Image (tube, coloured by chain):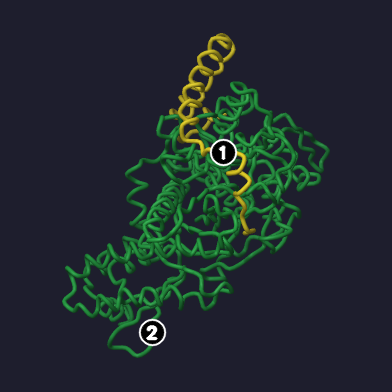
Chain colours: A yellow, B green
Protein backbone atom coordinates (compact mmCIF):
# COMPACT_ATOMS: atom_id res chain seq x y z
CA UNK A 1 0.00 0.00 0.00
CA UNK A 2 2.58 2.49 1.09
CA UNK A 3 4.78 1.44 -1.81
CA UNK A 4 2.27 3.11 -4.12
CA UNK A 5 3.01 6.35 -2.40
CA UNK A 6 5.05 8.57 -4.60
CA UNK A 7 6.42 10.60 -1.69
CA UNK A 8 8.77 8.82 0.65
CA UNK A 9 8.49 5.64 -1.38
CA UNK A 10 11.87 4.32 -0.45
CA UNK A 11 11.30 4.65 3.21
CA UNK A 12 7.81 3.17 3.13
CA UNK A 13 8.89 0.05 1.26
CA UNK A 14 11.88 -0.38 3.50
CA UNK A 15 9.63 -0.29 6.52
CA UNK A 16 7.25 -2.88 5.17
CA UNK A 17 10.17 -5.14 4.27
CA UNK A 18 11.31 -4.92 7.84
CA UNK A 19 7.84 -5.81 8.99
CA UNK A 20 7.78 -8.79 6.59
CA UNK A 21 11.06 -10.06 7.93
CA UNK A 22 9.66 -9.96 11.38
CA UNK A 23 6.58 -11.92 10.33
CA UNK A 24 8.71 -14.57 8.63
CA UNK A 25 10.80 -14.98 11.71
CA UNK A 26 7.64 -15.02 13.73
CA UNK A 27 6.16 -18.03 11.97
CA UNK A 28 9.28 -20.12 11.30
CA UNK A 29 11.14 -19.80 14.58
CA UNK A 30 8.19 -19.25 16.84
CA UNK A 31 9.26 -21.59 19.62
CA UNK A 32 12.85 -20.49 19.67
CA UNK A 33 11.79 -16.88 19.61
CA UNK A 34 9.39 -17.33 22.50
CA UNK A 35 12.09 -19.02 24.53
CA UNK A 36 14.52 -16.24 23.76
CA UNK A 37 11.96 -13.57 24.57
CA UNK A 38 10.98 -15.05 27.85
CA UNK A 39 14.62 -15.21 28.89
CA UNK A 40 14.92 -11.56 27.94
CA UNK A 41 11.73 -10.71 29.84
CA UNK A 42 13.04 -12.65 32.86
CA UNK A 43 16.01 -10.26 32.96
CA UNK A 44 13.71 -7.27 32.84
CA UNK A 45 11.50 -8.68 35.59
CA UNK A 46 14.56 -9.23 37.77
CA UNK A 47 15.47 -5.59 37.39
CA UNK A 48 11.91 -4.49 38.05
CA UNK A 49 11.69 -6.64 41.18
CA UNK A 50 14.45 -4.43 42.56
CA UNK A 51 12.61 -1.16 41.99
CA UNK A 52 8.99 -2.15 42.64
CA UNK A 53 7.57 -0.46 45.72
CA UNK A 54 7.49 -2.78 48.70
CA UNK A 55 4.14 -3.89 50.06
CA UNK A 56 2.24 -3.72 46.78
CA UNK A 57 -1.09 -4.23 48.50
CA UNK A 58 -0.98 -1.19 50.77
CA UNK A 59 0.82 0.95 48.19
CA UNK A 60 -1.87 0.36 45.60
CA UNK A 61 -4.64 0.76 48.17
CA UNK A 62 -3.32 4.11 49.34
CA UNK A 63 -3.07 5.56 45.83
CA UNK A 64 -6.30 7.52 45.96
CA UNK A 65 -6.93 10.47 43.66
CA UNK A 66 -9.45 13.23 43.69
CA UNK A 67 -11.29 13.46 40.41
CA UNK A 68 -10.06 15.51 37.51
CA UNK A 69 -10.99 16.36 34.00
CA UNK B 1 -1.52 21.68 18.47
CA UNK B 2 -0.64 20.97 22.06
CA UNK B 3 -1.42 18.74 25.01
CA UNK B 4 -2.30 19.10 28.68
CA UNK B 5 -1.60 16.39 31.23
CA UNK B 6 -2.89 16.14 34.76
CA UNK B 7 -0.45 14.01 36.74
CA UNK B 8 -1.51 11.62 39.47
CA UNK B 9 -0.09 12.72 42.83
CA UNK B 10 0.45 10.91 46.10
CA UNK B 11 2.34 11.12 49.35
CA UNK B 12 3.28 7.51 50.15
CA UNK B 13 1.86 6.48 53.49
CA UNK B 14 -0.46 9.49 53.60
CA UNK B 15 -3.46 8.70 51.40
CA UNK B 16 -5.43 11.57 52.92
CA UNK B 17 -2.89 14.28 52.14
CA UNK B 18 -4.58 17.34 50.67
CA UNK B 19 -4.02 16.96 46.93
CA UNK B 20 -4.55 20.63 46.13
CA UNK B 21 -1.90 21.53 48.68
CA UNK B 22 0.61 18.92 47.51
CA UNK B 23 -0.03 19.91 43.87
CA UNK B 24 0.67 23.52 44.80
CA UNK B 25 3.88 22.46 46.52
CA UNK B 26 5.00 20.81 43.30
CA UNK B 27 4.25 23.83 41.12
CA UNK B 28 5.67 26.35 43.59
CA UNK B 29 8.83 24.34 44.16
CA UNK B 30 9.54 24.34 40.45
CA UNK B 31 8.66 28.01 40.03
CA UNK B 32 10.87 29.04 42.92
CA UNK B 33 13.82 26.98 41.71
CA UNK B 34 13.50 28.49 38.23
CA UNK B 35 13.35 31.99 39.65
CA UNK B 36 16.47 31.38 41.71
CA UNK B 37 18.26 30.12 38.65
CA UNK B 38 17.15 33.11 36.66
CA UNK B 39 17.92 35.57 39.44
CA UNK B 40 21.52 34.48 39.41
CA UNK B 41 21.65 35.58 35.82
CA UNK B 42 19.89 38.88 36.53
CA UNK B 43 22.40 39.68 39.21
CA UNK B 44 24.95 39.48 36.52
CA UNK B 45 23.05 41.45 33.92
CA UNK B 46 21.10 44.05 35.84
CA UNK B 47 22.59 47.02 37.62
CA UNK B 48 19.91 47.58 40.21
CA UNK B 49 19.68 44.96 42.94
CA UNK B 50 16.25 46.21 44.03
CA UNK B 51 14.98 45.26 40.65
CA UNK B 52 16.04 41.68 41.29
CA UNK B 53 14.23 41.46 44.56
CA UNK B 54 11.21 42.95 42.95
CA UNK B 55 11.35 40.40 40.16
CA UNK B 56 11.27 37.60 42.65
CA UNK B 57 8.27 38.98 44.51
CA UNK B 58 6.54 40.05 41.39
CA UNK B 59 6.72 36.60 39.94
CA UNK B 60 4.90 35.30 42.97
CA UNK B 61 2.24 37.93 42.64
CA UNK B 62 2.04 36.96 39.03
CA UNK B 63 1.02 33.49 40.01
CA UNK B 64 -1.84 34.92 42.05
CA UNK B 65 -3.05 37.65 39.74
CA UNK B 66 -3.20 35.54 36.64
CA UNK B 67 -5.63 33.24 38.35
CA UNK B 68 -8.30 35.79 38.97
CA UNK B 69 -10.16 34.41 36.01
CA UNK B 70 -9.78 30.89 37.31
CA UNK B 71 -12.45 29.38 39.46
CA UNK B 72 -9.80 27.66 41.58
CA UNK B 73 -8.25 30.92 42.68
CA UNK B 74 -5.36 30.79 45.09
CA UNK B 75 -3.75 27.80 43.37
CA UNK B 76 -0.30 27.95 41.87
CA UNK B 77 0.02 28.80 38.21
CA UNK B 78 3.16 29.69 36.27
CA UNK B 79 4.24 30.12 32.68
CA UNK B 80 7.63 28.60 31.91
CA UNK B 81 10.41 29.80 29.64
CA UNK B 82 9.62 26.95 27.23
CA UNK B 83 6.21 28.55 26.71
CA UNK B 84 4.37 25.88 28.71
CA UNK B 85 2.00 26.37 31.62
CA UNK B 86 2.52 24.55 34.92
CA UNK B 87 -0.35 24.85 37.34
CA UNK B 88 -2.80 23.21 39.67
CA UNK B 89 -6.01 22.05 38.05
CA UNK B 90 -8.58 20.50 40.36
CA UNK B 91 -6.46 18.28 42.57
CA UNK B 92 -3.57 17.58 40.21
CA UNK B 93 -0.47 19.32 38.98
CA UNK B 94 -0.93 19.91 35.28
CA UNK B 95 1.51 20.63 32.48
CA UNK B 96 0.26 22.20 29.25
CA UNK B 97 2.77 22.10 26.44
CA UNK B 98 3.49 25.20 24.42
CA UNK B 99 1.81 25.34 21.01
CA UNK B 100 3.62 23.27 18.40
CA UNK B 101 3.03 22.80 14.68
CA UNK B 102 3.69 19.08 14.28
CA UNK B 103 3.47 15.76 16.14
CA UNK B 104 7.24 15.34 16.48
CA UNK B 105 7.47 18.60 18.44
CA UNK B 106 4.39 17.50 20.38
CA UNK B 107 6.41 14.48 21.56
CA UNK B 108 9.41 16.61 22.52
CA UNK B 109 7.50 19.15 24.62
CA UNK B 110 5.23 16.51 26.15
CA UNK B 111 8.30 14.49 27.23
CA UNK B 112 9.89 17.71 28.55
CA UNK B 113 6.86 17.92 30.84
CA UNK B 114 7.82 14.57 32.38
CA UNK B 115 11.28 15.91 33.19
CA UNK B 116 9.78 19.09 34.63
CA UNK B 117 7.44 17.12 36.89
CA UNK B 118 10.27 14.85 38.07
CA UNK B 119 12.42 17.92 38.72
CA UNK B 120 9.54 19.66 40.54
CA UNK B 121 9.09 16.67 42.87
CA UNK B 122 12.82 16.68 43.63
CA UNK B 123 12.72 20.40 44.47
CA UNK B 124 9.60 19.97 46.60
CA UNK B 125 11.36 17.27 48.62
CA UNK B 126 14.18 19.70 49.46
CA UNK B 127 11.85 21.97 51.39
CA UNK B 128 12.56 21.28 55.08
CA UNK B 129 9.85 19.26 56.77
CA UNK B 130 8.20 18.16 53.54
CA UNK B 131 7.18 14.59 52.79
CA UNK B 132 8.21 13.03 49.48
CA UNK B 133 5.59 13.44 46.74
CA UNK B 134 5.24 10.93 43.91
CA UNK B 135 3.92 11.89 40.48
CA UNK B 136 2.40 9.56 37.89
CA UNK B 137 1.67 10.17 34.23
CA UNK B 138 -1.45 8.04 34.18
CA UNK B 139 -5.19 8.64 34.17
CA UNK B 140 -6.87 6.70 36.94
CA UNK B 141 -6.43 5.58 40.54
CA UNK B 142 -8.49 2.46 39.78
CA UNK B 143 -10.94 3.46 42.48
CA UNK B 144 -13.32 5.50 40.40
CA UNK B 145 -11.31 8.68 39.80
CA UNK B 146 -9.94 9.68 36.41
CA UNK B 147 -7.91 12.72 35.43
CA UNK B 148 -7.21 13.84 31.96
CA UNK B 149 -4.63 14.06 29.30
CA UNK B 150 -6.09 16.38 26.71
CA UNK B 151 -5.03 17.28 23.22
CA UNK B 152 -5.84 20.52 21.44
CA UNK B 153 -6.01 21.08 17.73
CA UNK B 154 -6.73 24.29 15.89
CA UNK B 155 -9.53 23.70 13.41
CA UNK B 156 -10.94 26.09 10.87
CA UNK B 157 -14.10 27.79 12.10
CA UNK B 158 -15.86 27.03 8.83
CA UNK B 159 -15.75 23.27 9.44
CA UNK B 160 -19.26 22.13 10.42
CA UNK B 161 -19.16 20.60 13.90
CA UNK B 162 -21.47 17.80 12.72
CA UNK B 163 -18.74 16.67 10.32
CA UNK B 164 -16.23 16.60 13.16
CA UNK B 165 -18.57 14.46 15.26
CA UNK B 166 -19.42 12.11 12.38
CA UNK B 167 -15.88 11.40 11.24
CA UNK B 168 -13.96 11.74 14.47
CA UNK B 169 -16.14 9.50 16.66
CA UNK B 170 -15.33 6.19 14.89
CA UNK B 171 -11.69 7.26 14.76
CA UNK B 172 -11.61 7.94 18.53
CA UNK B 173 -13.46 4.72 19.35
CA UNK B 174 -10.66 2.75 17.66
CA UNK B 175 -7.55 4.96 18.04
CA UNK B 176 -6.81 3.27 21.37
CA UNK B 177 -5.31 0.26 19.53
CA UNK B 178 -2.13 2.32 19.29
CA UNK B 179 -2.81 5.26 21.63
CA UNK B 180 -3.88 3.30 24.72
CA UNK B 181 -1.52 3.15 27.70
CA UNK B 182 -2.94 -0.10 29.04
CA UNK B 183 -4.71 -0.65 32.33
CA UNK B 184 -5.12 -3.44 34.88
CA UNK B 185 -8.74 -3.50 36.01
CA UNK B 186 -12.07 -3.11 34.29
CA UNK B 187 -14.85 -0.62 35.02
CA UNK B 188 -14.46 2.86 36.48
CA UNK B 189 -13.53 1.52 39.90
CA UNK B 190 -11.22 -1.09 38.39
CA UNK B 191 -12.90 -3.94 40.24
CA UNK B 192 -13.37 -6.07 37.16
CA UNK B 193 -10.41 -8.37 36.62
CA UNK B 194 -8.36 -8.17 33.48
CA UNK B 195 -6.27 -5.98 31.25
CA UNK B 196 -7.57 -3.37 28.83
CA UNK B 197 -6.04 -1.13 26.18
CA UNK B 198 -7.03 2.22 27.59
CA UNK B 199 -6.77 4.04 30.91
CA UNK B 200 -9.64 6.32 30.01
CA UNK B 201 -12.19 4.36 27.97
CA UNK B 202 -14.36 3.19 30.87
CA UNK B 203 -14.83 6.79 32.04
CA UNK B 204 -16.63 7.86 28.85
CA UNK B 205 -20.38 7.80 29.04
CA UNK B 206 -21.84 9.96 26.30
CA UNK B 207 -21.16 10.74 22.63
CA UNK B 208 -21.00 14.54 22.57
CA UNK B 209 -21.00 17.15 25.33
CA UNK B 210 -19.37 20.00 27.18
CA UNK B 211 -18.50 18.18 30.39
CA UNK B 212 -14.97 17.06 31.19
CA UNK B 213 -15.24 15.84 34.78
CA UNK B 214 -18.42 13.78 34.72
CA UNK B 215 -20.53 12.19 32.00
CA UNK B 216 -17.44 12.53 29.85
CA UNK B 217 -18.18 12.73 26.12
CA UNK B 218 -16.21 11.11 23.28
CA UNK B 219 -16.34 14.47 21.50
CA UNK B 220 -15.97 17.49 23.75
CA UNK B 221 -17.62 20.69 22.63
CA UNK B 222 -15.59 23.18 24.68
CA UNK B 223 -14.74 26.02 22.36
CA UNK B 224 -12.24 28.53 23.71
CA UNK B 225 -9.99 29.05 20.73
CA UNK B 226 -7.30 31.18 22.44
CA UNK B 227 -6.98 32.61 18.94
CA UNK B 228 -9.14 34.57 16.52
CA UNK B 229 -12.59 33.03 17.08
CA UNK B 230 -13.73 34.10 13.62
CA UNK B 231 -11.10 31.93 12.01
CA UNK B 232 -10.55 29.08 14.42
CA UNK B 233 -12.03 26.77 16.92
CA UNK B 234 -9.88 24.79 19.31
CA UNK B 235 -10.89 21.17 19.26
CA UNK B 236 -10.44 19.98 22.82
CA UNK B 237 -9.87 16.23 22.77
CA UNK B 238 -10.39 14.63 26.16
CA UNK B 239 -10.51 10.95 25.27
CA UNK B 240 -6.78 10.22 25.08
CA UNK B 241 -4.55 8.42 27.56
CA UNK B 242 -1.40 10.02 28.92
CA UNK B 243 1.32 8.21 26.97
CA UNK B 244 4.96 7.66 27.79
CA UNK B 245 6.09 5.82 24.66
CA UNK B 246 7.23 8.28 22.02
CA UNK B 247 5.60 6.38 19.17
CA UNK B 248 2.26 6.27 21.00
CA UNK B 249 2.34 10.05 21.48
CA UNK B 250 3.53 10.68 17.93
CA UNK B 251 0.82 8.53 16.36
CA UNK B 252 -1.92 9.76 18.68
CA UNK B 253 -1.35 13.37 17.71
CA UNK B 254 -0.14 12.83 14.16
CA UNK B 255 -3.03 10.68 13.00
CA UNK B 256 -5.64 12.82 14.77
CA UNK B 257 -4.28 15.91 13.13
CA UNK B 258 -4.36 14.23 9.70
CA UNK B 259 -7.95 13.09 10.20
CA UNK B 260 -8.91 16.64 11.21
CA UNK B 261 -7.23 18.04 8.10
CA UNK B 262 -9.31 15.65 5.98
CA UNK B 263 -12.48 16.71 7.78
CA UNK B 264 -11.65 20.39 7.23
CA UNK B 265 -11.08 19.72 3.54
CA UNK B 266 -14.23 17.57 3.35
CA UNK B 267 -12.17 14.75 1.95
CA UNK B 268 -13.74 11.79 3.74
CA UNK B 269 -16.56 10.49 1.58
CA UNK B 270 -17.16 7.23 3.41
CA UNK B 271 -19.35 7.04 6.49
CA UNK B 272 -17.86 4.93 9.27
CA UNK B 273 -20.52 5.79 11.84
CA UNK B 274 -20.35 3.22 14.62
CA UNK B 275 -23.45 1.64 16.08
CA UNK B 276 -23.42 2.44 19.83
CA UNK B 277 -20.08 4.25 19.99
CA UNK B 278 -19.78 4.46 23.79
CA UNK B 279 -20.36 0.77 24.30
CA UNK B 280 -18.05 -0.05 21.42
CA UNK B 281 -15.34 2.16 22.89
CA UNK B 282 -15.45 0.05 26.06
CA UNK B 283 -15.58 -3.24 24.16
CA UNK B 284 -12.58 -2.37 22.02
CA UNK B 285 -10.63 -1.40 25.11
CA UNK B 286 -11.55 -4.61 26.89
CA UNK B 287 -10.18 -6.83 24.12
CA UNK B 288 -6.35 -6.81 23.94
CA UNK B 289 -6.50 -9.60 21.35
CA UNK B 290 -7.94 -6.94 18.99
CA UNK B 291 -10.41 -9.44 17.53
CA UNK B 292 -13.60 -7.70 18.65
CA UNK B 293 -15.84 -6.78 15.73
CA UNK B 294 -17.04 -3.20 15.60
CA UNK B 295 -20.48 -2.85 14.09
CA UNK B 296 -21.05 0.12 11.82
CA UNK B 297 -24.46 1.65 11.26
CA UNK B 298 -24.19 0.55 7.64
CA UNK B 299 -24.26 -3.04 8.89
CA UNK B 300 -20.61 -3.65 8.10
CA UNK B 301 -18.50 -5.39 10.77
CA UNK B 302 -14.77 -5.01 11.12
CA UNK B 303 -12.10 -4.97 13.82
CA UNK B 304 -10.84 -1.73 15.36
CA UNK B 305 -7.53 -2.21 13.55
CA UNK B 306 -9.34 -2.66 10.23
CA UNK B 307 -11.40 0.47 10.83
CA UNK B 308 -8.18 2.37 11.56
CA UNK B 309 -6.79 0.95 8.33
CA UNK B 310 -9.76 2.52 6.51
CA UNK B 311 -8.85 5.90 7.98
CA UNK B 312 -5.23 5.31 7.05
CA UNK B 313 -6.21 4.58 3.43
CA UNK B 314 -8.21 7.80 3.31
CA UNK B 315 -5.28 9.72 4.74
CA UNK B 316 -2.82 8.17 2.31
CA UNK B 317 -5.01 9.20 -0.62
CA UNK B 318 -5.56 12.62 0.89
CA UNK B 319 -1.87 13.34 1.29
CA UNK B 320 -1.12 12.04 -2.21
CA UNK B 321 -3.93 14.15 -3.62
CA UNK B 322 -2.90 17.34 -1.81
CA UNK B 323 0.86 17.13 -1.76
CA UNK B 324 1.90 14.52 -4.33
CA UNK B 325 5.60 13.93 -3.93
CA UNK B 326 6.01 17.18 -2.03
CA UNK B 327 4.87 15.80 1.31
CA UNK B 328 6.77 16.99 4.38
CA UNK B 329 8.88 14.31 6.10
CA UNK B 330 6.92 14.35 9.35
CA UNK B 331 3.57 13.75 7.63
CA UNK B 332 5.20 10.96 5.65
CA UNK B 333 6.50 9.45 8.87
CA UNK B 334 3.02 9.56 10.41
CA UNK B 335 1.64 7.68 7.40
CA UNK B 336 4.47 5.14 7.32
CA UNK B 337 4.31 4.40 11.03
CA UNK B 338 0.52 4.34 11.10
CA UNK B 339 0.42 1.70 8.38
CA UNK B 340 3.31 -0.29 9.78
CA UNK B 341 1.86 -0.34 13.30
CA UNK B 342 -1.63 -1.34 12.11
CA UNK B 343 -0.25 -4.09 9.89
CA UNK B 344 1.70 -5.60 12.76
CA UNK B 345 -1.15 -5.16 15.26
CA UNK B 346 -3.27 -7.23 12.93
CA UNK B 347 -0.61 -9.97 12.71
CA UNK B 348 0.40 -10.09 16.38
CA UNK B 349 0.00 -7.15 18.79
CA UNK B 350 3.03 -8.27 20.80
CA UNK B 351 5.23 -7.23 17.86
CA UNK B 352 4.65 -3.65 19.04
CA UNK B 353 6.30 -4.13 22.43
CA UNK B 354 9.03 -1.65 21.53
CA UNK B 355 6.63 1.02 20.27
CA UNK B 356 3.31 1.16 22.12
CA UNK B 357 2.65 1.71 25.81
CA UNK B 358 -0.12 -0.84 26.22
CA UNK B 359 1.85 -3.61 24.56
CA UNK B 360 5.02 -2.92 26.55
CA UNK B 361 2.98 -2.87 29.76
CA UNK B 362 1.13 -6.04 28.85
CA UNK B 363 4.38 -7.86 28.16
CA UNK B 364 5.63 -7.00 31.66
CA UNK B 365 2.35 -8.05 33.22
CA UNK B 366 2.22 -11.33 31.31
CA UNK B 367 5.82 -11.94 32.37
CA UNK B 368 4.81 -11.61 36.02
CA UNK B 369 1.70 -13.68 35.54
CA UNK B 370 3.70 -16.47 34.00
CA UNK B 371 6.71 -16.36 36.31
CA UNK B 372 4.82 -15.93 39.58
CA UNK B 373 1.44 -17.41 38.57
CA UNK B 374 -0.43 -14.21 39.37
CA UNK B 375 -4.10 -13.55 38.66
CA UNK B 376 -5.27 -10.19 37.36
CA UNK B 377 -6.60 -9.13 40.76
CA UNK B 378 -3.15 -9.42 42.38
CA UNK B 379 -1.93 -6.16 43.93
CA UNK B 380 1.49 -6.61 42.36
CA UNK B 381 0.02 -6.40 38.85
CA UNK B 382 -1.88 -3.25 39.81
CA UNK B 383 1.40 -1.89 41.15
CA UNK B 384 3.19 -2.63 37.87
CA UNK B 385 0.41 -0.74 36.06
CA UNK B 386 0.73 2.25 38.41
CA UNK B 387 4.50 2.33 38.65
CA UNK B 388 4.87 2.11 34.86
CA UNK B 389 3.96 5.82 34.88
CA UNK B 390 6.08 6.96 37.86
CA UNK B 391 8.07 9.97 36.60
CA UNK B 392 11.21 9.15 38.60
CA UNK B 393 13.95 7.73 36.39
CA UNK B 394 15.00 5.23 39.04
CA UNK B 395 11.48 4.08 39.87
CA UNK B 396 9.31 4.46 36.79
CA UNK B 397 8.98 1.16 34.93
CA UNK B 398 8.62 2.87 31.55
CA UNK B 399 11.81 4.72 32.41
CA UNK B 400 13.61 1.51 33.37
CA UNK B 401 12.54 -0.15 30.12
CA UNK B 402 13.58 2.91 28.13
CA UNK B 403 16.96 2.99 29.87
CA UNK B 404 17.50 -0.62 28.74
CA UNK B 405 16.84 0.46 25.17
CA UNK B 406 13.56 -1.42 24.98
CA UNK B 407 11.67 1.42 23.29
CA UNK B 408 12.03 2.69 19.79
CA UNK B 409 12.84 6.41 19.86
CA UNK B 410 11.91 9.18 17.46
CA UNK B 411 13.38 12.14 19.32
CA UNK B 412 16.63 12.52 21.25
CA UNK B 413 17.36 13.10 24.93
CA UNK B 414 19.14 16.32 23.96
CA UNK B 415 16.03 17.64 22.22
CA UNK B 416 13.84 16.82 25.23
CA UNK B 417 16.30 18.36 27.67
CA UNK B 418 16.55 21.55 25.61
CA UNK B 419 12.74 21.76 25.51
CA UNK B 420 12.61 21.98 29.31
CA UNK B 421 13.80 25.58 28.97
CA UNK B 422 13.43 26.53 25.32
CA UNK B 423 10.16 27.15 23.46
CA UNK B 424 9.31 25.78 20.00
CA UNK B 425 10.61 28.16 17.35
CA UNK B 426 7.69 28.21 14.95
CA UNK B 427 4.73 29.38 17.05
CA UNK B 428 3.83 32.31 19.32
CA UNK B 429 5.14 30.21 22.22
CA UNK B 430 8.57 31.43 21.11
CA UNK B 431 7.68 35.04 21.93
CA UNK B 432 6.05 34.09 25.24
CA UNK B 433 8.90 31.87 26.35
CA UNK B 434 11.69 34.22 25.34
CA UNK B 435 9.95 37.16 27.07
CA UNK B 436 9.71 35.14 30.26
CA UNK B 437 13.35 34.27 30.02
CA UNK B 438 14.74 37.68 29.19
CA UNK B 439 12.27 40.08 30.82
CA UNK B 440 10.92 37.93 33.66
CA UNK B 441 11.01 40.80 36.13
CA UNK B 442 8.78 42.89 33.87
CA UNK B 443 6.23 40.26 32.91
CA UNK B 444 3.15 40.72 35.08
CA UNK B 445 1.24 37.85 33.51
CA UNK B 446 1.17 35.72 30.42
CA UNK B 447 -1.47 33.58 28.81
CA UNK B 448 -1.87 31.71 25.55
CA UNK B 449 -2.95 34.83 23.70
CA UNK B 450 -1.06 37.65 25.40
CA UNK B 451 1.96 38.72 27.39
CA UNK B 452 1.34 41.50 29.90
CA UNK B 453 4.19 43.77 30.98
CA UNK B 454 4.54 45.86 34.11
CA UNK B 455 6.97 48.64 33.19
CA UNK B 456 8.51 51.09 35.66
CA UNK B 457 7.66 54.15 33.53
CA UNK B 458 4.05 53.19 32.82
CA UNK B 459 1.22 53.31 35.28
CA UNK B 460 -0.97 50.80 33.54
CA UNK B 461 -0.01 47.30 32.51
CA UNK B 462 0.95 46.90 28.87
CA UNK B 463 -0.72 44.02 27.10
CA UNK B 464 0.86 42.57 23.99
CA UNK B 465 -1.71 40.35 22.27
CA UNK B 466 -0.55 37.14 20.57
CA UNK B 467 -3.81 36.09 18.99
CA UNK B 468 -2.30 34.49 15.91
CA UNK B 469 -0.62 31.22 16.94
CA UNK B 470 1.77 31.43 14.00
CA UNK B 471 3.07 34.92 14.75
CA UNK B 472 5.74 35.65 17.32
CA UNK B 473 7.93 32.89 15.93
CA UNK B 474 11.71 32.88 16.10
CA UNK B 475 11.80 34.17 12.57
CA UNK B 476 9.52 37.08 13.49
CA UNK B 477 10.89 38.19 16.83
CA UNK B 478 14.37 36.81 17.48
CA UNK B 479 16.06 39.97 16.18
CA UNK B 480 13.65 42.17 18.10
CA UNK B 481 14.24 40.38 21.41
CA UNK B 482 18.02 40.34 20.93
CA UNK B 483 17.98 44.05 20.16
CA UNK B 484 15.77 45.09 23.10
CA UNK B 485 17.74 44.99 26.30
CA UNK B 486 14.75 45.76 28.51
CA UNK B 487 11.04 45.09 28.37
CA UNK B 488 10.48 48.84 28.03
CA UNK B 489 12.51 48.83 24.82
CA UNK B 490 10.52 45.87 23.58
CA UNK B 491 7.11 47.35 24.30
CA UNK B 492 8.19 50.68 22.81
CA UNK B 493 9.22 49.00 19.57
CA UNK B 494 6.13 46.83 19.40
CA UNK B 495 3.70 49.69 20.00
CA UNK B 496 5.41 52.32 17.88
CA UNK B 497 3.24 51.37 14.94
CA UNK B 498 5.74 49.20 13.12
Q: Looking at the image, which residue sits at the far bottom?
A: B459
> Residue placed at 77% from the left, 33% from the top?
B293
Left or right of B192: which side holds B175? left
> Residue placed at 55% from the left, 36% from the top?
B338
Task: Residue B140: tell me if it is visible.
Answer: yes
- Decide: is B10 above or below B466: above
Task: Residue B268: tell me if it is visible.
Answer: no
- In percent of width and height, residue B277 lies at 76, 47
Q: Which disc is residue B461 wearing?
A: 2
| Residue B468, quarter of picture | bottom left
- In percent of width and height, residue B177 lies at 63, 37
Q: Which residue is mark 1?
A: A55
- Label 2 resides on the chain identified as B
- SS at mark 1 in the image: loop
- In percent of width and height, residue B212 lies at 66, 60
Q: CA distance from mark 2 to mark 1?
A: 54 Å
Q: Residues within 10 Å of mark 1 (few under 14, many from 20)?
A: few
Front-most of residues B263 and B75: B75
- Label 1 resides on the chain identified as A
Evaluate if marks 2 and 1 touch, with contact meaning CB atoms under 8 Å apart.
no
Amino acid sequence: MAAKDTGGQERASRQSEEADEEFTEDSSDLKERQARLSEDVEDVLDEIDEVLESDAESFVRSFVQKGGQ
Amino acid sequence: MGSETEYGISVPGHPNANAMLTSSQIVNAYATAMQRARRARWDFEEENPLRDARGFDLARELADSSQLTDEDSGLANVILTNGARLYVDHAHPEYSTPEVTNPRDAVIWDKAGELIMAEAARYAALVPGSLPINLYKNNTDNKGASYGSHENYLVSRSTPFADIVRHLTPFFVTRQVFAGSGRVGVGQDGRGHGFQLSQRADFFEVEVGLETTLKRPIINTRDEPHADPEKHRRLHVIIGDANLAEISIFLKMGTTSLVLAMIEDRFIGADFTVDQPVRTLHEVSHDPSLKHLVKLRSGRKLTAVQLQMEYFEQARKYVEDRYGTDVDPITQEVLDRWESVLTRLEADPMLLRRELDWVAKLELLEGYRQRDSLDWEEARLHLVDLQYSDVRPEKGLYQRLAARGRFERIVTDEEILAAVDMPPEDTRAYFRGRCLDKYADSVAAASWDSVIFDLPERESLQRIPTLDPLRGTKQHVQGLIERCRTASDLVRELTSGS
